[in-house]
Amino acid sequence: MAGTRAGGSGGLRERWTSQGRDVMLMSPQGLKEGLKRRCMEHVKKNRKRILKNLRQHTSDVTSEVMDVSESICLEDLRLRGELTHDDYLDVLTSLESALHEEMRLEELELAEELLEAEEAWIADFEALDLHQGCYGSEFILCPLSMAPRLRWHGSKMPCQMPL
């Protein structure tokens, strides 16, 4: 019979196995999970570049989150009928929400670090004993080392901090 292979009873499953593909991905749910896993790995691997692109350009989030090869792969799957448009949108929205969550957590960590640094600076500033008025204390912060090491010595004010 024309178009058949000799001894090939399995067809697509055998071809996928011989190509090293996971046969579990043939089900729509397995395909969707595998695609989501690969996309998440891609986002994690290229996270810094993606975030840099998102911070520089805010025009089209979808095209900036996924690079060209991943979007072509998704588009090919969708056009071949292996991935429905709804599944495609589900994958994109889940990736976008995961990226937004990661960015939110990163911003929270940065805010906590800045708050801790500010609290430490305020504690150092309060330790200078500046509550005696405008000229009540002889301590002045050094603009280079930010240490309370400047004191009047005649007409000079040298920093006591070793460089």
Image (cartoon, grey):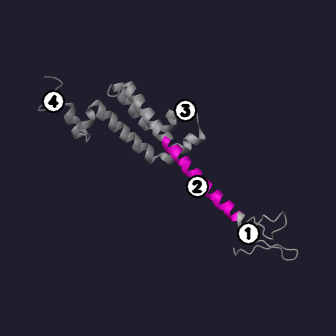
Q: Earlier in the sequence, mark 3 or mark 1?
A: 3
What is the spatial separation of the Cα atoms under label 2 and label 4, in whole angstroms? 64 Å
- Is 83 displayed left or right of 16 in the figure? right
Q: Which residue is mark 4?
A: 5
Q: Check disc 4 and give the amino acid type.
A: Arg
> Percent from the top left, x then y, of residue 64?
51, 37
Between disc 1 and disc 4, whose residue precedes? 4
* Mark 2 or 4, nearer chain start: 4
At x 85% / y 74%, what residue is drawn?
Answer: 156
Write the residue at 54% across / 51% down: 109
Residue extent of the magenta highlight: 101-125
Dot 1 amino acid type: Pro
Q: Which residue is mark 2?
A: 113
- Disc 2 residue type (three-letter): Glu
Q: Amino acid at mark 3?
A: Asp
Q: Earlier in the sequence, mark 1 or mark 2?
A: 2
Q: Looking at the figure, which quarter contains the N terminus?
A: top left
Residue 103 included in the magenta stretch of the image: yes
Label 3 with label 1: CB-CB less than 8 Å: no
Residue 125 point in image, percent of width and height? 71, 63
Q: How many marks?
A: 4
Name the secondary structure under disc 1: loop
Kindly state the secondary structure of the residue where label 4 is placed.
loop
Q: Which residue is mark 1?
A: 148
Q: Residues within 10 Å of mark 4 (few under 14, many from 20)?
A: few
How busy is the neighbourhood of tag 3: few (under 14 within 10 Å), some, or many (20 plus)? few
